[in-house]
Image (tube, rainbow, N blue to C red):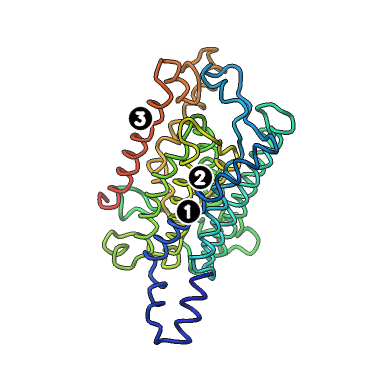
């Protein structure tokens, strides 16, 4: 909105106003989107927290968890509304809204936040730590991911998007997810995109649920999100920059660079929320925040062609999700548990680590994973 008003309109109407030319620079708008998101979060945070308290929207703690968590019962949840507002509004202000990729990612975050909102609402209404059924939640998540995949296919047919995979450490190996033999068939051409659609759904839904599983300690998920979103900001900017993309031999899609503004806003909103979510937390993000953030991170990774790098960008999220999968699988097959409790952050708590120690050490691990992901840009 501000980009359109101050640069597209005022500067082009009055070229003498050279000051407004600065609004065309992506780095400037990304920085201001981050700051706008941060201050938006800090300002509206107390208002949302007080509203949640008034409506008695508190968190319910499961009995089998660490005993130290029981004192957190009643802490306002659904604070992810703050994250969504503080990300979406600055993006609308500072991004080029004629860019279709911006809308794909924005709508993805809104849709996954809405699913999380429904889940949180069910928990509050029934006053228990169970919301939507697993089938209903996954069904909605896959539906949204499917629609995103269809939108990207439409962009691919216009030459604005590539369905080729970028493989870390292999600059010349770029397999295409589209079946060329079926692409020109008069009736079977939709099947040509089957593997691409399936892959996109798995990446986005997996990312959304991985962040959701990580959200179990004060500031843990949101701190890791700050780091992951920061890495995505760098990757998005590099992928949309002509010189950097050519130097690093990346798949360059000029319009994708505009998502840098969204990623910057996500970093700012996450820091703003961390102000209130740091231990001891004044508010929890709830599924409305974790599913929305995870869906947005997964969608950005798919759009900028860094799907295979996403497990490193969000390494802690992946480990948390794997710990749950291994725990459930082991118990069903062997009737034995691998960890004291899953997700794995509870395992370390039950080993005697304090909550703060678990959080900070997981942040450090997240930073190491993100830095490794960025080094792969050159190690190709």
Q: Which residue appears farthest toward the top when viewing the image?
A: 335
Q: Identify the element where label 2 is drawn.
A: helix
Residue 322, x across and y down, in percent:
47, 30
Residue 77, x across and y down, in percent:
61, 36
Of 96 and 153, nearer the camera is 96
- Decide which of tag 2 and tag 1 comes sooner along the chain: 1
Of 312 and 112, nearer the camera is 112
Q: Identify the element where label 3 is drawn.
A: helix
- Decide which of tag 2 and tag 3 comes sooner along the chain: 2
Q: Which of pointers 2 and 1 indicates the residue nearer the eye?
A: 1
Reading the image, the residue beneath label 2 is 203
Reading the image, the residue beneath label 1 is 39
Side (left or right) of 190 relative to 96: right
Quadrant of image for the N terminus: bottom right
Could you tell me which residue is drawn at 37 percent across and 37 percent down?
366
Instruction: Please tell me whether residue 190 is drawn above or below residue 66 in the rendered image.
Output: below
Q: Which of pointers 3 and 1 indicates the residue nearer the eye?
A: 1
């Amino acid at each position: 909105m501000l980009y359109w008003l101050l640069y597209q309109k005022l500067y082009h109407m009055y070229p003498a106003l050279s000051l407004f030319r600065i609004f065309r620079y992506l780095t400037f708008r990304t920085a201001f989107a981050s700051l706008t998101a941060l201050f938006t979060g800090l300002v509206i945070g107390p208002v949302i927290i007080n509203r949640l308290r008034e409506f008695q929207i508190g968190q319910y703690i499961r009995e089998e968890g660490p005993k130290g968590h029981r004192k957190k019962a009643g802490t306002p949840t659904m604070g992810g509304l703050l994250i969504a507002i503080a990300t979406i509004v600055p993006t609308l202000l500072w991004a080029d809204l004629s860019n279709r990729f911006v809308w794909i990612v924005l709508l993805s975050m809104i849709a996954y936040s809405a699913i999380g909102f429904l889940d949180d609402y069910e928990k509050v209404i029934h006053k228990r730590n169970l919301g939507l059924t697993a089938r209903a939640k996954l069904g909605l998540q896959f539906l949204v991911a499917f629609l995103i995949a269809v939108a990207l296919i439409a962009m691919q047919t216009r030459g604005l998007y590539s369905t080729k995979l970028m493989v870390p450490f292999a600059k010349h190996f770029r397999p295409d997810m589209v079946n060329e033999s079926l692409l020109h068939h008069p009736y079977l051409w939709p099947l040509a995109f089957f593997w691409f659609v399936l892959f996109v759904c798995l990446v986005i839904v997996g990312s959304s649920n991985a962040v959701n599983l990580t959200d179990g300690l004060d500031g843990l998920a949101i701190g890791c999100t700050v780091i992951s979103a920061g890495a995505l900001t760098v990757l998005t900017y590099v992928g949309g920059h002509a010189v950097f993309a050519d130097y690093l031999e990346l798949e360059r899609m000029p319009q994708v660079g505009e998502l840098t503004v969204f990623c910057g806003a996500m970093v700012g909103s996450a820091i703003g929320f961390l102000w209130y979510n740091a231990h001891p937390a004044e508010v929890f993000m709830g599924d409305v925040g974790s599913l929305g953030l995870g869906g947005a991170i997964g969608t950005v990774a798919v759009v900028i062609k860094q799907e295979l790098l996403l497990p490193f960008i969000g390494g802690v999220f992946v480990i948390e999700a794997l710990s749950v999968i291994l725990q459930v699988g082991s118990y069903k097959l062997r009737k034995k548990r691998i960890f004291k409790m899953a997700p794995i952050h509870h395992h370390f708590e039950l080993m005697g680590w304090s909550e703060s120690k678990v959080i900070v050490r997981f942040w450090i691990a997240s930073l190491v994973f993100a830095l490794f992901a960025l080094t792969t840009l050159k190690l190709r």
